[in-house]
Structure formats: C-alpha cells, structure tokens
Image (tube, helix red, strand yellow):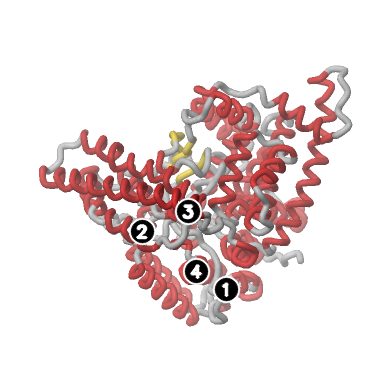
Amino acid sequence: MKLKLITACLLLVLSVSCSEAPQPISEASDSAELSSSSDAIDVLAVMLEPPAAEKKSNQNDVFDRFKDNLLNKTWELNPSFGVYVGVYQHDHKLAVPNGEQRALQREFYVTELQALKQFDANQLTSSNATDLAIIEGELRSQIWYIDVFRSYEWNPAQYNPAGAFGVILNTEYKPLPERLVAISSRLKLVPAYYQAALDNLKLPTLEHLSLAIQQSGGTLNMFEVVIPEKIGGVDLDPQLLEELTTGLADSASAVKSYIDWLEARQLELRQSGEARSFRIGAELYEKKFKHDIESSYTAEELYNIALAAKENLHIEMMRITEELWPSYFNERPMPDNRLHAVKEMIDHLSQKHVKRDEFVDEIRRQIPIIQAFMDDNELLDSDPTRPLVVRLTPEYQRGFAGASVNAPGPYDATANTYYNVSPLDSYTDEQAESYLREYNHWILQVLNIHEAIPGHYTQLMHSNKSPSKIKSIFGNGAMIEGWAVYAERMMLESGYGDNEPELWLMYSKWNLRVVMNTILDYSVQVLDMQEQAALDMLMNEAFQERTEAEGKWRRATVSQVQLTSYFTGYSEIYAFREELKLKMGDRFDLRTFHNKFLSYGSAPVPVIRSSMLAELGLDALR
C-alpha cells in the first residue's frame, strides 16, 4: 500500500520501492472480477443516504472495525510504510521484497477486497462510503501493480531502504538508544533486501539504472556516514554498538555490491542495445492514469485539454508582455512573433535572482512572509504547532526533484515536515546560473507557495487532522499536487504580490509548466516523443531554461503519469470552487471552502466534491 510522500514538485514523488518506499496507488487488475475503483467513485452521489438514515446503520460500526484491522495488517506487511505514517511498533522490521513477500501481499489484497463485498455503501455514512471507494481502489491498484505493471522486474531505482532508516533516525518518537536498537535489527536484513532486488530484476531500463546508481550513492552515505555520526554521540551498550557496527558494514557492502551490479548491467545493456524501453505505451499508460489519478477524464482527454490550455496561456502571456514592453525596452518595437517577444521579456526579467550561495537562505527568509500574508488575509487555517523545517535534500532522495516536501503521517502528525531543497554544489557555474534564472525573483516565491504555504505543507497538515485516516494515508496524488497548484493561483488572486504584472507573467510561465507536464508525459510515454523535440518544446513553447528542461526530460523517462497529476487536480479543484460559488452565491466564503475541502484529507477530488455537495444538500452540476 502507499502513502503519497510529496516528494513533490519540482517535483514531486518518486522512486517507489516495492516493499520499502510507499507504493504508488494505481490501477485495477485486467480481470473481469477486479474492475476499476473509479466506478465506485462515480456513483457515490447516488449511493449516499441522508445523514439521519446513515447514522442508523449498524454497518458503520462493522466497517470502522474493518478499517482498523486493514490498517493493522498493512503495517505488519509493510513496516516501512508504517514508519512513514507514524506507526512505529514494527520499526525493527525490514520487509524483504522477494517473491514470498509479494505473494503474501497479494493474498492480503485479494482477501480484503473480497471482504469489502459485505458492505453496502447505501448503509454507510458519507465519510465511510468514500473510505469504501478509496480502499477498493487501493486494493485493486496494488494487485494490478503486482500482476500487470511488474516494475519490480525493470526498475532498480525502487529498491532503496534508506528512507525509513532516515525517519527512524531523525524522528524522536522514543529515545535514540531505543531507535538504534530498531535500526540494528533492520540492518541485519539489508543484505537479503538487496539480494531480493537482484533476483527480481530481469531487464531494466537504462534510465532507471542511472537513477538507481545515483540514489544508491546516497543510501551508501546513510550507512557509512549518517548513522555512524549519530552513533558517535551516544553512550551505547557494547553489544549493541558491536551489532550496529557489524550491521552497518554488512549493509554498506550490500549497497556497494548492488552499485557494482547496476554499473555492470548498465554497460552491458548499452553495448548490446537490449535494454527495456522506459516508455510504457498507450494501454498501460491509460490504465495507470485511471487509478493513479482517479479523474473524470481519460489520459487522452486530459492531454487534449492541456493542449488547449497551452494556447490560452500563450495568449495571456502575450497580453502581459505587450503591457510591460515599453517599461523594459523603451522605444524598441516588439518582435512580430509575439511568442518570441514573450521569451525575450521572460529572459530579461529572469536576470533578477538570488546568488548561488544564497538560494536556500532566501527560501528560509520567504516562508514566514508568505505565512503572514495567508494569515492576515484569512485564506485558510494554519497551525503554528506543526513545524516546517527547510533543509538540504538528503542525498538518497536527490536526482528526482529540485524541491520537495516530506510530511509526517497522521499517526505522528506533530512531527516535523521537511521542505527539501537540493543544493547547487554539483552544478557548473553555467548550470547554476541557468537554474537560478529559472527560479528567479518571482518564480521562487511561487515555488515556495507551492511546496510550503499554503501548498503541500499546509494541505498535508490539514490532511493529518482529518478524522478519516484512510483518506490521509492513501493520499491521492492528483489532489495533493492539484491543491499546491491551486494555492499558487489563489494566492495571486487574493492580492499576493500586489498584482504586479511581472509576477503574473512569471506565474503564467510557471502554470504553463504544469500544463506542459501533462503534454510532455503523454507525448513521451505514449506518442514516442524524442529528447530533442521535448527540449525544443519545453524551451521554446514553455520558456524553460535548458537545465530545467533537461531535468524534466529525465523525469519523464523515470516516471509515468505522475507529471499529469498537477494539471488534473488543479483543474478539478478550481472548477469545483467556481461551481460552489455559483451555487451558493453570497453564502460562499473562501476560507470556509478551503478549510472544508481540506478536512476530507487527501482523497481524490471527485470524492471530495461528491461528499461536500451531499453534505451541503446541493445537487451537482452536470
């Protein structure tokens, strides 16, 4: 099962390990019995009974016990998943991702899916009815991943146990010596973990081999540097110290052997040309989209909507450029090609950015300013008791996103949320300048809104307060990413930045990135777009710097569908808000809408929409 760790946004989330990192929620099995969970979601509005009738149902008590049992079994089978969400009773266990473990997991998913048939959504409260739909989708998804998608055979980057070790090491849920006992126990299974990875992998892709080599270097650092440094400051029992020393040495050796295998396999496949393609094709993509995103659109429909959105953004950006042109270029006439004019204006404005060595400090400076604006304008409830910590991205997480958020789970909701920012040390001067121009004075503010306040950090903080742990734990990526994108526009609409046209132009460029994510991902994975065509599109039609474009190309080769989550969720959230404004008229209040929307946890947007409309007694607009 999976937790949507927002290893977002530049993004977000995701070399997923089949047993160690939270699993991506995906699709249904191809069998007739395991049809898509979206059917259950689509009919929620019909299934929901009036609140008075719902409360009379004895099924709700039975279903609540079912959910508790489901989660307890989940933590037993997926102890690292439990650690991510704040369940620590199995922190000493490391699941070895071998065939036996997969068989146990599959049996669990099938058994629980069969048990769901005892519940009638008409007899459940609206909250439980939505939980029922989410659980069904999750179970079908996991079966599909094991039976059909089978990434454990071709994605070596998903084998990385470092994340849970980092959580245990850095989260003070019990004294450090006791946490080190758990770490010592886990370390004993690391060699078996990597042996299972080698046994599983059949024909990897070159792109995932490259990512695995990079991230495994960070994992090695965890065992050779990070944990030993922590041990050095603690007075430990000699036997525990000996066990830790041995376990760390054996684990480091296992990682080194894995890296050696990856590098040898990479060379072999480059020479032979027999590597698996990273492109999953139309059929798998459409199914993965259906279950990962849980949208009312198909992937192809969303792709076409994104193409139209790109044209509309171009028109708006040309309008703003015409307004700004005289202020920056005096009497020089605009180019006849208005897109060239937009690019020239963006290039000129992008020269305003922080210095390379001030990048992380500037992010830390901006966070309280953005928080104050949100609070002063009463846009959304906040909670100062839930800390946000800006830090350098841990090495074992680098290579996928420039910025991301790691949030605690609902069982340990008061733990730190980490805003990870990748340092620029590995960049040449030219690459660093390109990166800083991309995250210039204006876009850096939009990035912080997206990743932190009121984006991912704020949304996940609210999600952890949801009374439904199901909605928080099995978070929907499109809702999570879509909220962060929605937050950007909402803040600017509320007056952040004093409606400065430069900010709106840069926001439009940033929003164009969201649209282009969808176009790029579908074009690369389904339509066979090649690297140069992708770079040309990103740089000339989305006005991205080369470093950013190259990073996005790489991301589109090591993930599938996730890049579409931003545009899907944003579009559906924004449309729902406008729908409610129309229905409620003067009764509509923005802060109330935001708080209510987020109170449903990280459920799919269609689920939240159905639940809110039912609760408000409003008929859905069709």
**Circle on res. 52:** 1
**Circle on res. 482:** none
Of the two numbered discs 3 and 1 in the rendering, the one whose residue sits closer to the viewer: 3
Look at mark 4 in the image and give the residue it sits on.
Answer: 135
Q: Quadrant of the C terminus?
A: bottom right
Of the two numbered discs 4 and 3 in the rendering, the one whose residue sits closer to the viewer: 3
Residue 20 is drawn in which quadrant?
bottom left
Cα separation, mark 4 vs mark 3, equals 40 Å
Q: Earlier in the sequence, mark 2 or mark 3?
A: 2
Cα separation, mark 1 vs mark 2, equals 56 Å
**Circle on res. 269:** 3
Q: Are marks 1 and 4 in contact (CB under 8 Å)?
A: no
Whether residue 315 sits left or right of residue 355 in the image: it is right
**Circle on res. 198:** 2
Q: Is residue 14 visible?
A: no
Of the two numbered discs 4 and 2 in the rendering, the one whose residue sits closer to the viewer: 2
Residue drawn at 35 percent across, 54 percent down? 83
Q: Amino acid at mark 3?
A: Leu
Q: Residue furthest front?
A: 272
Whether residue 151 sits left or right of residue 438 in the image: it is left
Q: Is residue 366 visible?
A: yes
Q: Earlier in the sequence, mark 4 or mark 2?
A: 4
